[in-house]
Amino acid sequence: MQTNSIEHNTVKSIDDQNRTGATPHGLSIEIHGLGKSFGDRHVLQELDLSIKAGEFIAIVGKSGCGKSTLLRLIAQLDSPSSGQIKWSKSPDQARQQTRIMFQDPRLLPWKSVSSNVALGLGEDDKAVIKKRLKEVGLEDRGHEWPIKLSGGQKQRVALARALAHSPNLLILDEPLGALDALTRLEMQSLIESLWVKEKFTAVLVTHDVSEAIALADRILLLDDGKVTANIPVNLDRPRSKGDAEFANLEKILLGKILNRSKVH
């Protein structure tokens, strides 16, 4: 099996962290020779990857290429068949400092919005809950039930719940995939603003190439269980889809995903 070595790139937005006033507190991650098989099916093969603390990584690729499997391994929801993952903290500490957002917000319908955000927190954390709801624009909806909220509002609650624990690693498994276009853009902006402010490490899986470009410092293209492209996004934030460089990068990425251009 051929090893796919991922060359580490320095990305402008990471270099410019001092201008935001934020110091990265995220987990750094080193992945070496990672493989995952289900029976005779090799989902991930000899994958190597480095993720810096506070970096925002997006993973794109066709359905079935291994994106969500990689996320599950990074989040310690599953074990690799081969290779290893090393975090800047112990595995137990890394697990405790990791939170996940899914496409389904997974709110408990019998609990209020505030109670959903409070899951896993103590009685002394009411100020944290209030702060996080305010950050996502729902400070006046804490008493309501999830059924009263729109899809976008439910994902805002899911984001507040994840960030209430001040995670060092935020895993984003297509959390915006079911939202309408406008709500999706609003959520992208919200996630980006909170990431810039807090500098946790973020790993996003998405089918939306423009979303990956809008949010990520680096974009990884996964194909048949291997990383076939590692592309830095050297665009100033906030990013605009109308920008010529944005459009050009989107064209390049789509070409690689659809195999219209040679992957280097």
Image (spheres, helix red, strand yellow):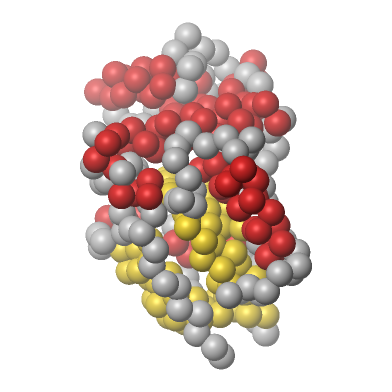
Left or right position of 68 against 5: right
- For the point 39% across and 38% down, which residue is it? 195
Which residue is pictured at 39% across the width and 28% down the height?
118
Q: With respect to residue 31, does 213 lie above or below?
A: above
Q: Position of residue 1 (x, y in %)?
A: 56, 90
The correct choice, above or below, for 107 with respect to 102 in the image is above
Classify the position of the C terminus by image quarter: bottom right
- Residue 199: tell me if it is visible: yes
Q: Quadrant of residue 64?
A: bottom right
**Furthest residue to the front?**
244
Q: Is residue 67 above or below residue 149?
A: below
- Picture quadrant where residue 76 is located: bottom left
Residue at 51% from the left image edge and 65% from the top image edge: 230
Work out whether residue 179 or residue 127 is closer to the camera in this orientation and state it: 179
Q: How many marks?
A: 0
At horizontal 34% and vertical 20% (from top left) the residue drawn is 131
- 244 or 70: nearer the viewer: 244
